[in-house]
Amino acid sequence: MNMIDVKVAAIKQVTPLIKHFTFVKEDGSELPSFSGGSHIVVALDADGRTYRNPYSLMGSPTETDAYHISVRRQENSRGGSAFMHENVSVGMTLKITHPVNLFTLAKMAHKHILIAGGIGITPFMSQIEDLKRLGVEYELHYAFRSYAQAAFVDELKKSCGSSLYCYGDSDGERLDMQGLLSWQPLGTHVYVCGPSPMVVSVIETARNLGWPEHSIHNEQFLSPPVGEPFKVQLAKSEIEVEVPAEMSMLEAIEAAGVKAEYLCRGGVCGRCELGVLEHDGGLEHHDHFLTESEKASCRKIMPCVSRSKGKRLLLDL
Amino acid sequence: MALNFKQETFRDDYSYSNSAHAIRRFPFPFAEDQYMYSVNIEPHTKGEPGSVYEFPFDIDEHYVAECLDKEITLMQDPGRYHALPHMMDAQWDFLELTMTALANDYPEHFSLSRNGQTWTWDNKPLGVCDTFTFGDSSTLVREPFDYIGRQVQGDFVLLDQRDGTLYADAGIVTSQADWSLAFNVGMSWKEWHGPVPRATEIGVMDRALKYLLNLQLANPVRRLNWTMTVNPRLDTSPENYPYWGGDRNKVNTDNVGDLVNLRVELQSLFRLPRSNAIVFSIRCYLMSLKDVTSYPRWAKRLHRVQKTMHPDLIEYKGMTKFHPIVVDWLSKFDDGAELGIGTHPE
Amino acid sequence: MERGYWIKSKPVYTSLVWHEKATSHLVLATGIGGMAVLKLFQQMHPRQPVTVLYARYAQMDADYSETLKKVVPENLYIFKFEEALLASLKEILPDTRMGLRLYVAGSEGFIWDVAGVAKQFGIDDAEIMKELTDTLARSVYCVHCKSVTRNVTTNIVPCCGCERMLFVRDHFSRNLGAYMGLMVDAESPGELPAIEEIYP
């Protein structure tokens, strides 16, 4: 995969938990254009291993002199977000992938309802720029714990005006999902990014109201979950790899020097899919890609987020 | 190195021909003695200097004549260009991709100067020079895709990605192997490939789709496809089938080497940045069977491939009428010697 | 035709079944398609509001309007011809909301006329439940002159625009709501295969 070398041009503490990073090309040239909702994967070398974490690109897709991402420091972080917060400083160089978009706006929609929870606001920051440029009707509904902890509210007020609706939980403000989705004109699409319960709630509400599947969109990147350690045997490479508790299978395979395909590293895109030849005790699927029957068959696995329930796996790699 | 553009035609008197250089760089598609439909997608990376893979968009000695033929086809049938309204971002993406590539790879012939959103495009071989505002269609004489699509060899289809599939939502198509843009525009991947025999059954199309949905910026891919065409005609469209279909009856043992052309499509696919659409580029290369035999290795390989071709594919590619004559004629060039894998001419 | 060979552009039609999840239902039918509507109401009377638009005349004469009046509790609108029904549909759709489910029963021509109207309002044809009743007659798009010949019941048909004899391919365009027609005797002028009625 072609990587881009970037330099950290600025870091800003946005809230106690969120930092905003600005990246520029080392030689000062322009970065590639992208579409609203795109993400990049940032590669970080730390503690003798490489972390690769996906982050949504914020800012306007048409302004390509710099890329912007925001990183929320995750509790129980396996290292990626903690490393970004503690060890990345201005002037450092990093490698990033070209932008990938797994959360695109439906170009034929007549109206867009964007629903964000907390740090889930980030992919919408670039999408609203596209929507404004195209002059399409939209509403941004942004829910968070408290105004003190919410990122980018002032910025959004300026840029979205009356299309922005904020909901501060500590102020007793709640988003009435049922009300919002019951009275939308034909051709409306809904998008949600945020904590898992919120995503599920939006999807379920829209479905129950009879919204067609293709008008419901969500982005739910998973961080690779911590699990039990296990061993992976690679049939073609003829090697054995230990997967420690706090490392994903994909990371462990890469650390062993075996080239594996990947794109989103969050269980969404399906690119890293591997064939499972043998297992002892089943698979712990965490991805959003495989169908339920594929998951049940135990013949395929997404090594970016999924793990073995047993002690050992034999993979077709 | 400046190219020497030929004056020639792809219709009426068919004065099209290949120079020795063009024959040598021809993208011969058969690496093995047997052919079967497959995904055969590979990264569209920079190839050897002089080869058709040297640059993302190959410009060759036929450039000017081909663009002229394209103009004629579009004038006679404006329906060969079609873009659905939601594809405007993709149109500008396409214009940027092609102008940038051509200016960068063929600086003797094309130049692009960018001053903010004000761009000046200078196409010397076609004598076109225009200044326009990027992103503002009213500053060009045509829609951006139509404008620049006429100035690049090959056909182009812009694919919109949504609902887990790709839709052919815009195209400029004048040198197609018997499919109709006007009929297919707006179709999903599966509908579009509906008529491909056998391939669908073995899941080739599903696998290719899955691969393309994950196509990344700056990582284009390519594949070769092929058929045979009577006369070096670019416009073998269903639209004009009444005018070229009858040519299939004209092939006989004496003229087959001159009349029948191997038609190879270099298909490449690029992810577009602002629209997240994909451009599907179909660049057509034509070479008479006689020219194929300039290289004995190619003649032998082509004979073996054709001899073992599945009848469904022969029918699908519209070769049924003249195929036995082709195989018989090619057999004279095949001594049965082992060839080894590879598409190289010698 | 080769067995097991299925052209995937050809639409698949099913029997109408109520969507369980919806905020309202809109049912459209012509002629004998009225029977499909009656069958829907045999399944149940949905809790959500239902509107039925019915045009009495289609290819096959079968007027179900009297029975529909007895079965459909409210919001039944009866028209003489398809055109008036489609005009009414255009007036209804702007006032409806997400959660509306669409059901169509009639000829293929009617189904895709409805889909064409719905598309203007952001409804994808995949969201519309479609039952093919009435005739199997096809709309045929002439790839040469771009005219559409409607109500084609034969494998080969003269184009209403350019008069070429067209072979009706099994390749369907949802955008045009028509099958592709390709000149049948381009390679051998005047030599026509037997013309047979296969889409009665």
Image: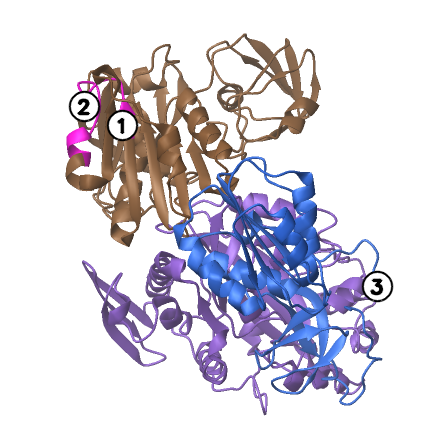
Q: Please indicate, yes or no, whether residue B292 appears anywhere in the rendered image.
A: no
Q: CA distance from mark 3 to mark 2?
A: 73 Å
Crowdedness of circle 3 by 10 Å Cα count: few (<14), some, many (20+)?
few
Q: Are marks 3 and 1 on the same chain?
A: no
Residue at image mark 1: A70
What type is the residue that disc 3 sits on? Gly
What type is the residue that disc 1 sits on? Ser
* Residue B5 found in image quarter: bottom left
The label shown at residue C132 is none
Question: Would you place residue C132 above or below residue B219 in this image?
Answer: below
Secondary element at tag 2:
loop
The label shown at residue B336 is 3
Q: Colour of chain A?
A: brown
Q: Colour of chain C?
A: blue
Question: Would you place residue A123 above or below residue B280 in this image?
Answer: above
What type is the residue that disc 2 sits on? Val
Residue A148 at x, y = what percent? Answer: 17, 18
Q: Please indicate, yes or no, whether residue A276 appears anywhere in the rendered image.
A: yes
Q: Check the residue under mark 3 and report the chain it is in.
A: B
Q: What residue range appears in magenta?
A: A142-156
The answer to whether C142 appears left or right of B112 in the picture is: right
Which chain is purple in the rendering? Answer: B
Q: Do the CB atoms of the residues marked 2 and 1 lie less than 8 Å apart?
A: yes
Q: Do the CB atoms of the residues marked 3 and 1 lie less than 8 Å apart?
A: no
Residue B187 at x, y = what percent? Answer: 56, 59
Q: CA distance from mark 3 to mark 1?
A: 65 Å
Crowdedness of circle 2 by 10 Å Cα count: few (<14), some, many (20+)?
some
Residue at image mark 2: A14
Question: Would you place residue A304 above or below residue A35 in this image?
Answer: above
